[in-house]
Structures are given as C-alpha cells and as structure tokens.
Amino acid sequence: MDELGSRIGHSRENVNARVLPLFFAPHGMSYSVLFFTQDLPEECTVLRDCTESLVSLQHPEWAEILELAWTKNDFTHLPSSTTAPDDEFFTGGRSKDEIPTEEEQTPCSFNPSKPLKIFCDDLQLIENLTMEFELVEDWKKADIIWLHQHFYQYKELAVSNPGGLVNQFPCECCLTTKDLLAAIMCKNGEQSEYYQMTYNLNTELPAFVSTFQKRAKAGESNTWIIKPWNLARGMDMHVTQSLEKIVRLVETGPKIACKYIDRPVTFRREDTGKNVKFDLRFIVFVNSLRPLEAYVYNNFWIRFAINEFDTDRLDDVETHFTVFNYADPAKILQMKWEDFVVGLEKSHRSLKWKECEKKIHHSLRSILEKGSSELPPRGVAKNKQSRAMYGVDVMLQWNEDGKDVSPSILEINYMPDCTRACQYYPDFADTVFNTLFLQSIDEKRVTRL
C-alpha cells in the first residue's frame, strides 16, 4: 500500500472498491490489486472496507470491533470472560486419532537382554543410542515406534502390534498446539497459576478487546505478545501495547494473545554486562496418564536474549525474544545449567534455585494433569502403548511485591530437537529410551514429577 493505496479511504456503507492481495510467482512477491465494484464519477473518493478479511467473513458481528484501527469505540460493556469451546474446536482441521478402548489396550514390557527392534522416521536420537538395537521397516514388527510424523493408528497398533510402544499419545495436540493448550488452561475465563492470561483472537476477540480496554482504564499493565499457533521459531510474533495493531494482526492468520511477562527474572551476561531475558527448556518424559507418571530430565537448556531488557522498544526482537538459532553466533550465549544457576543466584541474592526448581516441577506436573483431565478430544487420551517426550519452555517472573518468583509455562513442544542434548550429554539418548520404554529410571538423570 504505497502513496496511492494509502489514500484509499475506509467505509462499510459506501464501498466502491476492493483491494486484494495477489502473489505473483514470477516476481516472487505480492501485490495489492485494486478492483472497482461500480462505475465512478470523476474526482469521486475511492472507498473500500479495510476490515475485509477471512475473520470478518466468519464473524460479521465483529464489524465494529474490527474497525478499531480506524474508528474509536468503547467495548468495556462486553464480557471479559469466555465460554469453553465445543468439541469441534478441538477436532476441526485435524486428522482423527483412532483410539482403542481400555479393554483393547495391552501393557507392554521388553526383554532387556534382547536387542530392541526400532521403527523410526528420523535417526537424530537413534544414532546416539549405545544399547543394542536393530532397525525394522514395518512398525507392526517393532518394539518401539519412534516417529517425528504424527501417528494416528492407535487402534490398529493394539491389534497388530500389542507388544509395541509408540512415542506419542492420542490427542496430545491438546498440549502441543498453542490454541488448544490456551483453551484448556483458560477454560471459562479461569486463569491458571502457571499460565499467562490468553485469548484466542479468532474466537474470543470481543472478550479480549473488552479486557484490554478495561485494563487501560484501570491503568494496569497492558503489554501483550501475539503468537500464531501454527508457526514456530518466532515467526509472525509481536510484542505490543497497541490495540489497533493487535486487531489488524488478526488478518494475517490465526493467533493467540498472551499477557506479556513484564517482570521477568533477568540474567546478567558476563560477556556483555547486560541484564537480559531468558527462558528455560525442560525435557519431560510421560509414561502414563490418569494416573500420571512423568519425569523431567535434570539437565535443562537456557536461551538468552541479546539486548538489555526494557519495555521502551517493544519491536526490538533481540530484547524480547530468546531463540536466535540463525543469528550471528557471536551474539549467542551458550551455557550449561550448572553455571547458569551459579550466575542466577549471583545476580539475584534473594533467589534460591532449589526453591525455583520445586515450583517449576510442580507447574510441569500441573499442566500435564490439567491437559489430560478431560476425555478426548478435550484432553490427551490414556493409552497403555503410548509414551511421549516433550520440550517445555518456562520463564521465571517476579511477583508484584518483587520478593518471590513464579514459573510461567510458555508452550509445550512436540518431539523437540535434541541435537544440543546429544552433544552436551552423550548418555541423553539412552536416558530417553531407558526412562520411556525400559522402565529403568536413573534418579541421577531424571526426577519424578
């Protein structure tokens, strides 16, 4: 939208034109194409409905809210609470898991004296195993099915390979997909102790706008981080205090709005002398649900921001984000957790890591319990042939009095990248398989949640 496009006015009543995006493959770029919808007299003002988008077509009743970028209006009379979504919200657009009944499920055990038969579609972890194993080409003949691709045939697994285990749970997308996790953790407007206030902008926009405007009137912190639930690595994520911007971001794809952690515990980087944000990646192993049997790997990973933390420049990626896999290596700080704990307690004398760790472990267990508390599709399904490894990202934040620290779970990642784990800890792959599949729990390496 250049000098011409930006002169096109907005109207919902007197529309005489439309502007639509067109991706032109030969040029490798997109253009905004102007169509007139009626004959226009000379010097007539060109007007289009700037709110026109997929969201406006799905929710025509939101027209006045979607106009907030151009017109001012007060929506504090709308309720801030939300209602629990229906089952279709959890199943729409997703392949259906075939779940066996509890009678059809068989508890599994392996003979550790025999080489494991493994079926896999990725060798990243498998190549680092030191235990004896052999690869098989048919998952129906495998002891362990280790997949990055999603597995759906749990019912067939129970019939064709009742002795096998797979590294996934039916309906685990309830945990690993941002919008579904938010629906579980913020059900009926309730806020979890370990999860930030979150709204789904494609289904709960009126409630979010009402909440935003009420907080603005009350002078409360109103910084939000907008996340697409179907992208990764920080793509299309924004930190902002602008309601107008947030409403416009709805047009670029499905998103959730999370209350931004504006009192994060920071870490002083000795290489730069800056107090920066960080988050912690924990590897969690789940062996069963209802009752929950889960473990956390005692070694964790830290991702650091680059610039000094402040809230003056919310558009500065190197201040507010922590994942820089493809950034200048000279800016990235790699540190083992033992050194991090020493530096953290040095930066904050009142902070005791052991106390923080207990709270983090409690939060990990709580979110797994809540994510599996309801039956599918509104929760993760119980399955005796399932095991899972998740990467859970956690931040620490100061409470309002500035004296105590609480963990906040950011997201749960399905089949996390384990390259760094295998490089740092040669026995990591064996720990994964021993914990998940062989019931060989080494308390020096994992802690039960």
Image (cartoon, rainbow, N blue to C red):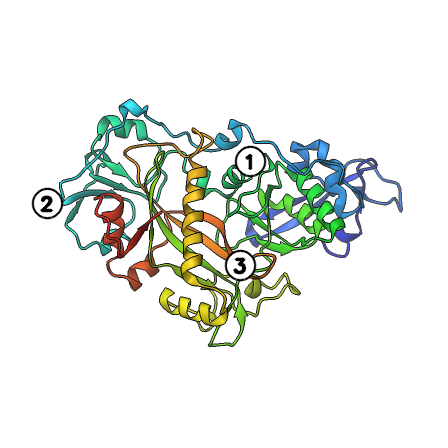
Q: Quadrant of residue 167?
A: top left
- The answer to which of 399 and 409 lies nearer the viewer is 399
Circle 2: residue type: Ser
Label 3: which residue?
A: 404
Residue 191 vs residue 126, the one in the foreground: 191
Q: Residues within 10 Å of mark 3 (few under 14, many from 20)?
A: few
In the rendered image, is residue 19 in sight?
A: no
1 or 2: tag closer to the N-terminus: 2
Query: Residue 144's x, y, as percent?
Result: 23, 41
Element type where label 1 sits in the image: helix
Tag 3 secondary structure: loop
Q: Position of residue 122 (x, y in %)?
A: 29, 48
- Residue 113: which disc? 2
User: Disc 3 and disc 1: Cα gap in Å?
Assistant: 27 Å
Left or right: 185, with 158 as reference point? right
Alpha-carbon span between mark 3 and mark 2: 49 Å
**Among the two numbered marks 3 and 2 on one chain, the one whose residue lies closer to the N terminus:** 2
Nearest to the eye among marks 1 and 2: give it: 1
Q: Residue shown at 50%/58% (left/top)?
A: 396
Q: How much space separates mark 1 and mark 2, taking CA atoms?
A: 47 Å
Most extreme residue toward the left, as rendered?
113
The residue beneath circle 1 is: 187
